[in-house]
Image: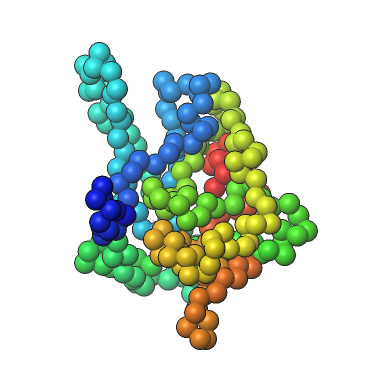
């Protein structure tokens, strides 16, 4: 980056990200009644810090701000059955929180998940799922998957994603950057995990993506109850 005098400036990064997440198109659609109890689901792909904000954009409604007090319910669900030992859940295992979110890298309980292995060979036999994860700058606002969550009993219509915005091609498995070194730079910048960057024996970086481990079920998307993740 350069200033107006064409003098190079140091790169500035803000971690964790402070930009607002983009709300699901299902939630934003005009046919979705916003004057009801609304459910949003966040699937965290990494340690995350988040804050919920409601912006009143017209001063005429400022007097209604008190109605938003105690209007939010937060439920945090964590995996509990992914690892067992001698018919008992494993307890006592700890891990350090990412230094990007905890300066002191505090200790928290270790959690395990069930994962789905999806390979490039699978994509050759069956069309790719429409809920493959975003990658790199798709997480520039935070490494979470934000979804709309509505029950079967609710009258809210199901709003499907536009097919062109979620359809994956064979290029998903190839390096989208000019070189593996540039892919490595973007992988570090966005803390990416769904990638094929590796370090070769000669110290150079290569790119070979053959499989993914997904923390959710592929092929099930735009579903009532949990959306696409």
- Total marks shown come to 0
Q: Position of residue 50 (x, y in %)?
A: 32, 46
In screen coordinates, is 63 left or right of 178?
Answer: left
Asked which colour scheme the image uses, the reply is: rainbow
Q: Please give left or right for residue 65 compared with residue 190 in the image.
A: left
Q: Residue at x 44, y 36 (%)?
A: 23
Find residue 104 and report its image quarter: bottom left
Percent position (x, y) of residue 184? Answer: 46, 68
Residue at 33 percent across and 43 percent down: it is: 19
Quarter in which the N terminus is drawn: bottom left
Q: Residue furthest right?
A: 125
Indicate left or right for 221 with 107 as reference: right
Task: Give the residue at the far bottom of this rendering.
Answer: 201
Q: Is residue 204 above or below residue 164?
A: below
- The residue drawn where x is 28% and y is 24% is 56
Most distant residue in the front direction: 5
- 221 or 167, nearer to the observer: 167
Q: Quick check: can you spot residue 223?
A: no
Q: Tell me which residue sits at (44%, 61%) in the image.
A: 186
The answer to whether residue 189 shows anywhere in this view is yes
**Image location of residue 144, percent across then percent down:** 43, 50
Q: Position of residue 210 (x, y in %)?
A: 64, 68
- Judging depth in this view, the residue of 12 and 165 nearest the camera is 12
Q: Looking at the image, which is closer to me, 10 or 212?
A: 10
In the rendered view, tell whether residue 2 sits above or below residue 160: below
């Amino acid at each position: 980056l350069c200033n107006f005098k064409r003098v190079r400036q140091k790169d500035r990064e803000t971690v964790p990200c402070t930009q607002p997440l983009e709300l699901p198109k299902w939630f934003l659609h005009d046919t979705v009644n916003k004057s009801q109890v609304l459910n949003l689901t966040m699937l965290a792909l990494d340690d995350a810090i988040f804050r919920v904000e409601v912006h009143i954009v017209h001063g005429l409604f400022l007097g209604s701000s008190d109605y938003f007090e105690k209007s939010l319910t937060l439920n945090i669900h964590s995996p509990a059955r992914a690892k067992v030992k001698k018919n008992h859940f494993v307890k006592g295992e700890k891990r350090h929180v990412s230094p990007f979110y905890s300066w002191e890298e505090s200790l928290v309980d270790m959690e395990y998940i069930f994962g789905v292995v999806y390979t490039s060979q699978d994509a050759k036999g069956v069309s790719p799922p429409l809920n493959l994860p975003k990658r790199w700058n798709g997480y520039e606002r935070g490494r979470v998957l934000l979804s709309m969550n509505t029950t079967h009993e609710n009258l809210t219509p199901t709003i499907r994603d536009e097919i062109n915005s979620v359809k994956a091609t064979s290029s998903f498995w190839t390096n989208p950057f000019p070189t593996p070194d540039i892919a490595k730079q973007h992988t570090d910048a966005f803390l990416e995990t769904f990638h094929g960057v590796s370090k070769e024996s000669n110290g150079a970086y290569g790119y070979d993506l053959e499989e993914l481990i997904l923390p959710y079920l592929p092929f099930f998307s735009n579903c009532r109850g949990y959306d696409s993740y």
